[in-house]
Every structure is written in structure tokens, then in C-alpha cells.
Image (spheres, rainbow, N blue to C red):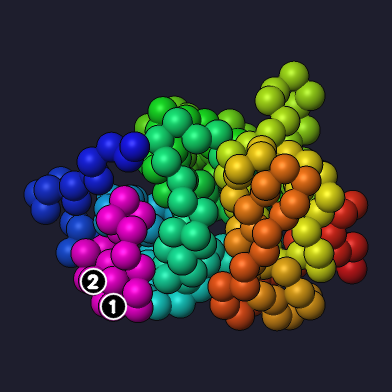
Amino acid sequence: MHKDPLPPAPPTDDPSHLARDLMVLHQLRGRGIKDAHVLAAMSHIPRELFLREPQRRHAYEDSALPSLSGQTISQPYMVAAMTEALAVSPGHQVLEIGTGTGYQTAILAELANPGLVCTIECLPELHALAQQNLSALGLQNVRFAFADGSQGWPDQSATLEFERILITAGAPQVPATLRRQLRDGGIMVVPVGARDSQVLLRIERRGNRYLELELMECRFVPLVGAEAWKQH
């Protein structure tokens, strides 16, 4: 069972709360996002914290924004849609492929708490920045790895099956290692397709079967790795 959704921070403590509430009302609720826990988490997490200073004034606009190393922070609606499809509950063990600056990670950590979010980033600048950002928020239930995300969680001493897996970059196909690391009954959300356009898939594992549901067309930066696209 979910805990009660987190309330928005009080106005006196949080100058961007109104912009977040308007984002939730118009961009998320207004476009069909219904999960109250996802909406509450996105009302609570300050997106501007995960952006460089020149971009912070655009934090609650309906668009993806540039971050570092040619990467982007996803559009709020896409973050909400992927998170809603993933159906994270408290206590879940979640694997995220593509930490970026950590915004999606923070949303997952709010929803999974007291469960654990394991997140992988292959770019050193983003790996370091995300750790700083999540530390500033005081989130304690996140583990970071600097590794090839297409090959899954690298710590062989850890549990290698996750109840939820979210891939935040476009893959040419679902990496076989990530299929294996999805627990029976678990859900994976992943963009799959060409380098410049994909379809967002929701995959549920039932024993040795993987049931796929196409959610929407989308466009993500490529997932690069041994089981994904090769680096140019």
C-alpha cells in the first residue's frame, strides 16, 4: 500500500511551489496523469535544483531542457508518464538506467521510500552532479553506480532482480541483461526504436514471458553501451 501523498511544501519555505503546482495542474493533470502519488512527488521535488543556472528560469516549462555532456532533463509530462506507468510503491527496489542530473531519480526515491533506488550513469560529469543534487535534497535511499547501464546493476553482491526498472535513454532493443534483472511480476519502462525516435514500452515479466504494451511515441537521447547503441 502507498503511504499518503506528500503535501506541497509551505509557500514561505519554497518560492517555486506555485510554479510546480501550476505545472502539475496544467501539464500533468490536464494531460491525463492521474496517479495521486506521482503528482504529489512532482509537486514536492524542485526541478530547478537539477538544472544549470541559465536554465532554472525555464524549470516548469513544458519542455525538455539541456543539461551536461549533450544530455537533457526530460519534459515534466514525460517524467510523470513514465513514472505512472512504472507504478512504484513504498518498499520497491528500483533500478534506473541513466541518472542524468538526478531529477527522475528523486521522484523515484520519494515513491519507493523506504525501498531502494539503484541508479546508473555512464557520464562522469552527470554521475558526480546527480550525487550532489540528491544529497542537497537529503534523500538517503539512493545508491549510485558509474557504469554501462545497458549491462544492468554492476554490484555482484547486491540483489540482481528489481521489482521496477526504468530506462531513461532510447535503446535499439531491450537489453537482455536488464530483462534478466527484472523480477518475476516486475515492470520495466523503456523507450525502444531508432536513434532519433522511439516507442515507450511498458514490459511486465510473468515467469519467462515478457508482456509488452506500447504507450506512446517519444524521443530520448541514445542509450550507449555493450547491449545498446555504440558510441559514435
Observer able to see residue 110: yes
Q: Residue at x 66, y 39 (%)?
A: 184
Q: Residue at x 42, y 63 (%)?
A: 80
Observer able to see residue 146: no
Q: Which residues are magenta?
A: 19-39
Give yes or no for residue 33 being in the magenta stretch.
Answer: yes
Q: How far across and how far down the image is residue 189, in percent?
A: 61, 58
Asked whether disc 2 touches disc 1, contact meaning CB atoms under 8 Å apart, the reply is yes
Give yes or no for residue 57 being in the magenta stretch.
Answer: no
Residue kind at label 1, given as amino acid type: Gly
Give the labeled residue for mark 2.
25
Residue 162 appears in which quarter of the rendering?
A: top right
Q: How far across and how far down the image is residue 222, in percent?
A: 75, 67
Give the labeled residue for mark 1.
30
Nearest the eye: 89 or 30 = 89
Q: Residue at x 78, y 42 (%)?
A: 180
Cα distance in 3D space between marks 2 and 1: 6 Å
Q: Residue at x 39, y 77 (%)?
A: 62
